[in-house]
Image (cartoon, rainbow, N blue to C red):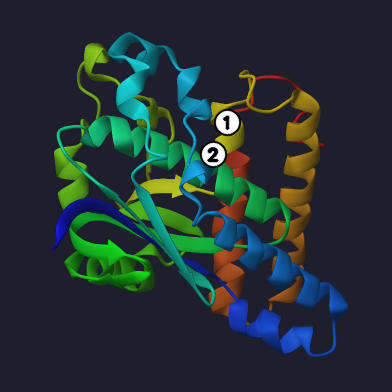
């Protein structure tokens, strides 16, 4: 039976090239293995925690119980892709808040390791049980990732945006996801792999020392990507876009972004 769900499709960018490199590089092989193991760990429902939401005043005011997703998140990995679905009742804003917080952390962790991802999130029907996945939600989120996302980001389908309290018009309608989402220059709404650090720079989720270290690694990933792809404009543009997002990060404490 189909279930109305938030459906996320995520793909690793440059995976084919990484696999080709791995035939002669133990470092590339280790990176593939560690990345896919991280993806595989997300198939465990307990991986989808509410810890990033529990510290949010907006969530506390609304009641934290409604933000839990660990007992209802389904996740299936295949090759370099991952599908996540969460059945929705009357709690779209709460569930989406916890999902987007988790995705921001996952994206940040992957970027510091040198991995770029791209994805789409839809609100539609899906069948997702015991690793079997099909339905409109999967098709829509896949097409969103493939045809519209373009850069290392996870973007939202228009029908999902219309159901959320976005853009925020009234302060009392604010949910934790509002601080993660951005409307990019091309009109797409979503998150990029660095936003986790902006949102949590003053929370207990990550220490300032760790932010400095992670941002330095992320910056190195971007610089290496730019330097290595002058002759491949379609890849160079992705790193250039990510560089712009890095430069736009609002980090309040001095010297953190410089690493």
CB contact under 8 Å: marks 1 and 2: yes
Q: In the picture shown, does residue 72 fall above or below 237? A: above
As drawn, which residue projects farthest toward the front? 130
Read off the residue under disc 1: 198
| Label ID, residue 195 | 2
Quadrant assignment, res 247: top right
Q: x, y percentage for residue 56?
A: 45, 17
| Residue in the foreground of this view, choosing between 32 and 42 | 42
| Residue in the foreground of this view, choosing between 19 and 216 | 19
Q: Is residue 231 visible?
A: no
Left or right of 76, for residue 161: left
Q: Residue at x 47, y 62 (%)?
A: 118
Q: x, y percentage for residue 20?
A: 71, 89
Q: Residue at x 24, y 12 (%)?
A: 172
Left or right of 249, for residue 64: left
Q: In the picture shown, does residue 152 fall above or below 167? A: below
Label 1 Cα neighbours within 10 Å, binned few <14 / some 14-19 / many ≥20: some
């Amino acid at each position: 039976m189909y279930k109305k769900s938030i459906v996320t499709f995520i793909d690793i960018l440059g995976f084919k090239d990484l696999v080709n490199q791995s035939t002669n590089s133990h470092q590339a092989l280790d990176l593939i293995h560690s990345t896919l193991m991280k993806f595989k760990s997300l198939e465990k429902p307990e991986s989808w925690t509410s810890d990033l939401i529990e510290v949010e005043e907006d969530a506390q005011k609304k009641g934290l119980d409604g933000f839990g997703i660990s007992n209802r998140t389904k996740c299936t990995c295949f090759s370099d892709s991952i599908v996540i679905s969460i059945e929705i009742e009357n709690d779209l804003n709460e569930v989406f808040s916890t999902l987007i917080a988790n995705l921001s952390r996952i994206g940040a962790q992957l970027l510091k390791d040198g991995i770029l991802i791209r994805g789409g999130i839809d609100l539609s029907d899906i069948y997702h049980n015991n690793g079997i996945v099909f339905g409109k939600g999967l098709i829509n989120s896949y097409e969103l990732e493939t045809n519209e996302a373009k850069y290392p980001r996870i973007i939202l389908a228009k029908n999902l945006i219309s159901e959320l309290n976005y853009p925020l018009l009234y302060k009392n309608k604010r949910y934790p996801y509002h601080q993660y989402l951005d409307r990019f220059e091309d009109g797409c709404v979503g998150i990029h792999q660095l936003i986790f650090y902006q949102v949590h720079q003053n929370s207990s989720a990550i220490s300032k020392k760790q932010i400095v270290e992670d941002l330095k690694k992320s910056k190195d990933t971007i610089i290496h990507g730019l330097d290595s792809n002058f002759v491949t404009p379609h890849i160079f543009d992705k790193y250039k876009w990510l560089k712009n997002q890095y430069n736009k990060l609002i980090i309040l404490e001095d010297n953190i972004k410089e690493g």
